[in-house]
Amino acid sequence: MSEARDTSPIDPKAFKQAENLIDSDPGGSLSKIRVVLEKLLRIIAAYYLGSPTEAKMLGQIIADKEFARHIEPRILSRMKSVKDLANLAAHGDQVYPQDAAKAFSELEEIIEWAQSRLPVIFQTRHKEVERKDILHDIINNWKYPVLPEIVSICFMQDAYGCHLEVTRKIEDPCIDPFEEEPTYSFKTESESLNMFRDHLQKKLFSPDKSIDENLDTFWKVTQAFDVIPIGLDIYTDEICDLLIAEAHPEREEEDSD
């Protein structure tokens, strides 16, 4: 019986080892960081370029102009930084815990970007993705209504953290005059919650906790705002203006002077 091909974009074992080795073995940590990034970039490259990339090394993928065209410059810069630090360790040069910590932080930013931009590649993980639809809780408990075209807001958890997934209904612009009802399509986007940290810069949402524990933290974090404080478009422009005014009342006072 053939073994199932691993299509997960991130190696969870290498990811955890990379984090655990930062202080005790920065060279080993950088080696694991490279393993994680190389696998992720191969899958991203295959998604965008439509061709197998298993034979390509990390530097070859990053240097590919067609690949780079699809990556935000700030993220491409982080990819190059991680590669350069990992190469130092691979060539036997002296590296320090702060080098490994910097590379790991940049790796996390790259993963968060990929989760937000390309959620589809994370839907093939072998680890079960847990999800809970919280749209009705938001409608019932929060101050302002979300856009009417939103049909689902899911709190999701996997081996690498938590994120929100928003699905909205979009009316098809090519309306068939012979159809009595308009046709719709659905658009789904997601955003990582890994940017939320406490005063010690520790992540508030941990994959080591249950989804219920993380969801409870989510409600506590957002309770003071009555709004999801991330970049997902779930409110009208008018409500967004109200939220900004409530969060920064000093701006109105400056405008009135």
Image (tube, helix red, strand yellow):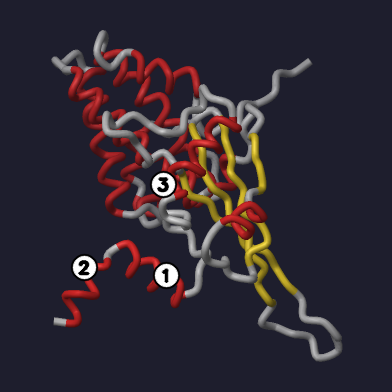
Q: Which residue is mark 2?
A: 250
Indicate which disc, 3 or 1, sits on the residue closer to the N terminus. Answer: 3
Report which residue position mark 3 lands on. Answer: 113
Proximity of marks 3 and 1: CB atoms separated by less than 8 Å: no
- Residue 49 in sight in this render: no
Q: Give the camera-side residue of 60 and 222.
A: 222
Q: Is residue 184 visible?
A: yes
Q: Looking at the image, which residue is at 38% across and 40% down?
A: 196
* Mark in the foreground, 1 or 2: 2
Three-letter residue code for mark 1: Cys
Specify which label sits upstream in the sequence, 2 or 3. Answer: 3
Residue labelled with disc 1: 240
Q: Is residue 205 left or right of residue 19?
A: right
> Hey, which quadrant is residue 81 in on the image?
top left
Residue lying at 34% horizontally and 42% vertically, measured from the top left? 62
Horizontal side of residue 212 vs 49, given as left or right: right
- Whole-angstrom CA distance, mark 3 to mark 1, is 23 Å
Residue in the picture at 41% in, 38% down: 194
Circle 3: is it few (<14), some (14-19), or many (20+) Cα within 10 Å?
some
User: Which quarter shows the C terminus?
Assistant: bottom left
Closer to the N terminus: mark 1 or mark 2? Answer: 1
In percent of width and height, residue 145 lies at: 57, 67
Q: Residue at x 68, y 61 (%)?
A: 151
> Gap between marks 1 and 2, in whole Å?
17 Å
